[in-house]
Amino acid sequence: MAKCRVCGAPAEAYLDYSRTYLCSRCFNDYYERKVGATIQRFKMIKPNDRVLVAVSGGKDSASLLAVLRKLLPDVEMAALYINLGIPQYSDHCEEKFKKITEVLGVESLVFDLKRELGFSIPDFRRTVYRRRLCSPCGTIKRYLMNKIAVEQGFSKLATGHHMDDIVETLFNSYLHGDVEQIVRLKPVLSSTHPKFVAKIKPLWNVTEQENLFYATYNELPVRTVGCPLAKGARSLEQKRYLSSLVEHIPNFRHVFLSSHMRELLPALERSITAPPLKECKKCGMPTSGEVCAFCKRAELVLGKISNQSPKFKV
Ligand code: AMP
Ligand code: FES
Ligand code: ZN
């Protein structure tokens, strides 16, 4: 049986990218040190920050909340869950969210899309997004996470994006030459407007598999079902491509991300100027167009299911 490289106890975790075996205790130490180093290196959180942690019910953001609570017990923190109204999924995730915030003793905020705004993500089936519901879902979630953080006076919004997510997104943006998207994807996205909260990704340097180990060894309550709307989504296909690359080149993600950060991002950042921000005509939030992406989608879906406009006003 394989032994832990640090203490020699029976190993439980195998890290593919470094071909290392660790027992669960040494793995937890390693994971916490790695996340702590990322927070320090990118100066993500200061002692007087108020951090809103977006928690979806999955293993990644559950690990994020647990590790932040452990590493920064004195920092003011709350967790946010957005119930997207997806049958057989959203209520299950909310239950896990409530459990984890209880176990960790973190204040919890729940935003229920259907109750607050009158539509849910499955309602987008009646729009042009019917075959790609993840797209409006992402727009709605990003908008609400930011808006709630700003309105409730949080200085940082933390999400559970991990190295696999980041490399997948970057890889895809490189394929399509989407320089703006590449430049926006950073461990810390500072606030460029009073209505934009600063966004941080403390799991920038850990893999999805490491989150799974951390959630399992710490017995975190996490969802046991996947989103039924994401079946066949392009993002799942990209995940498979990335896994097959990693099978052949185990440290592919680490090498790709570090050369991106060291060489390419600084050069790309110099070549891009952010578009000027205006106020959305509908909701007043900052946007580069006349009406923000959230309001466009909310109007579209509400127009299909009723004759309402979004109830959401600033
Ligand atoms: P995803 O875009 O689904 O991969 O999720 C990325 C991150 O966004 C997660 O790690 C969470 O931090 C956050 N997130 C996703 N869905 C929700 C949700 N329903 N409620 C709160 N946060 C979420
Ligand atoms: Fe957004 Fe499934 S969680 S489409
Ligand atoms: Zn708007």
Image (cartoon, grey):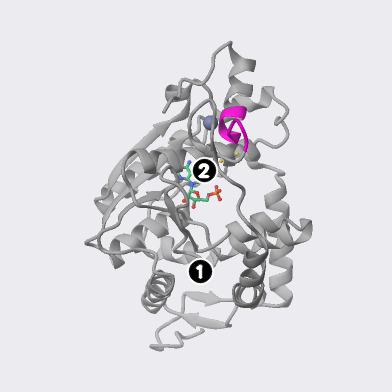
Front in this rendered view, residue 3 or 77: 77
* Picture quarter with the C terminus: top left
Please, what secondary structure does the residue beneath circle 1 have? loop
Q: Is residue 91 above or below residue 169?
A: above
> Is residue 87 shown to the viewer in this render?
no
Horizontal side of 190 relative to 186 (left or right) equals: left
Q: Where, by quadrant of the figure, is residue 242 drawn?
A: bottom right
Measure how far apart labels 2 and 1 are at the Cα level: 22 Å
Horizontal side of 121 relative to 284 (left or right) equals: right
Magenta residue check for 295: yes
Residue on which disc 2 sits: 142
Residue at the (68%, 51%) spot, across then down: 236
| Residue stretch rendered in magenta on the structure | 289-296
Location of residue 277 in the rendering, given as x and y in whole percent from the top left corner? 55, 43
Amino acid residing under circle 1: Val
Location of residue 301 in the rendering, given as x and y in whole percent from the top left corner? 61, 22
Magenta residue check for 264: no
> Around disc 2, counting alpha carbons within 10 Å, would you say few (fewer than 14), some (14 to 19), or many (20 or more)?
few
